[in-house]
């Protein structure tokens, strides 16, 4: 049995704001454009640790996201978001939603908004 529910862009659009939305990409990609309301929790930091699953869970808890909380996880193409969901499920997270299409899917519809971080906007001006 899968430890997470696979969701699509319509689900993300409907639920963002009512549950945490987590982008697990490195800050450079997150800053360049992310789904509005998304938090950036770095999978690369967790993956480089001795215990990636527990480190990722610590990072999630640091953002106020606990094992019983419903949360949507995404990345660029869905691969790293799946890895993040697998890590989190292994340490007791039970309400995971994997946005399988992730940013590649999100930006495919020009009607969907993308937020750019202040740091990128400052460099552009």
Image (cartoon, rainbow, N blue to C red):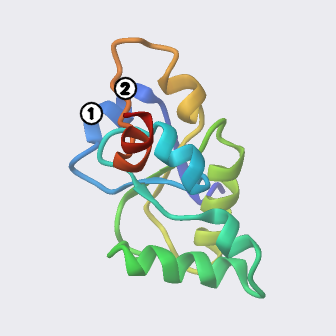
Residue at the left extreme, as displayed: 18
Q: Quadrant of the N terminus?
A: bottom right
Residue 104 figure quarter: top right
Residue at the bottom extreme, as displayed: 50
Q: Residue at x 61, y 82 (%)?
A: 55
Q: Is residue 86 above or below residue 48?
A: above
Horizontal and vertical percent position of residue 50? 78, 88
Q: Which mark is residue 10?
A: 2
Left-right relation of 102 to 115: right
Q: Residue at x 32, y 76 (%)?
A: 64
In the image, 8 versus 47, the foreground residue is 47
Horizontal and vertical percent position of residue 41? 50, 64
Q: Quadrant of the C terminus?
A: top left
Horizontal and vertical percent position of residue 82? 66, 51
Q: Residue at x 71, y 78 (%)?
A: 52
Horizontal and vertical percent position of residue 59? 50, 77
In the image, 27 versus 71, the foreground residue is 27
Left-right relation of 14 to 89: left
Marks 2/1: CA–CA distance: 6 Å
Q: Which mark is residue 25?
A: none
Q: Is residue 25 above or below residue 95?
A: above
Q: Is residue 112 above or below residue 79?
A: above
Left-right relation of 57 to 81: left
Q: Which mark is residue 14?
A: 1
| Disc 2 element | helix
| Disc 1 element | helix
In the image, 30 versus 86, the foreground residue is 30
Question: Could you classify mark 2 by the number of other residues whose Cα lies within 10 Å: few (under 14), some (14-19), or many (20 or more)?
Answer: few
Residue 27 figure quarter: bottom right
Q: Do the residues bearing badges 2 and 1 touch, measured as CB atoms within 8 Å? A: yes
Residue at the front extreme, as displayed: 125
Question: Could you classify mark 1 by the number of other residues whose Cα lies within 10 Å: few (under 14), some (14-19), or many (20 or more)?
Answer: few
């Amino acid at each position: 049995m899968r430890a997470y529910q696979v969701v699509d862009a319509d689900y993300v659009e409907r639920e963002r704001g009512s549950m945490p939305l987590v982008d697990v990409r490195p800050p450079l990609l997150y800053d360049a454009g992310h789904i509005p309301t998304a938090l950036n929790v770095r999978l690369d930091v967790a993956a480089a640790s001795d215990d990636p699953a527990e480190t990722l869970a610590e990072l999630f808890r640091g953002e106020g996201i606990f094992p019983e909380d419903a949360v949507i996880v995404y990345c660029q193409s869905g691969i790293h978001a799946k890895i993040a969901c697998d890590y989190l499920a292994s340490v007791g997270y039970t309400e995971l939603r994997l946005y399988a299409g992730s940013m590649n899917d999100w930006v495919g519809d020009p009607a969907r908004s993308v937020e750019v971080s202040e740091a990128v906007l400052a460099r552009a001006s």
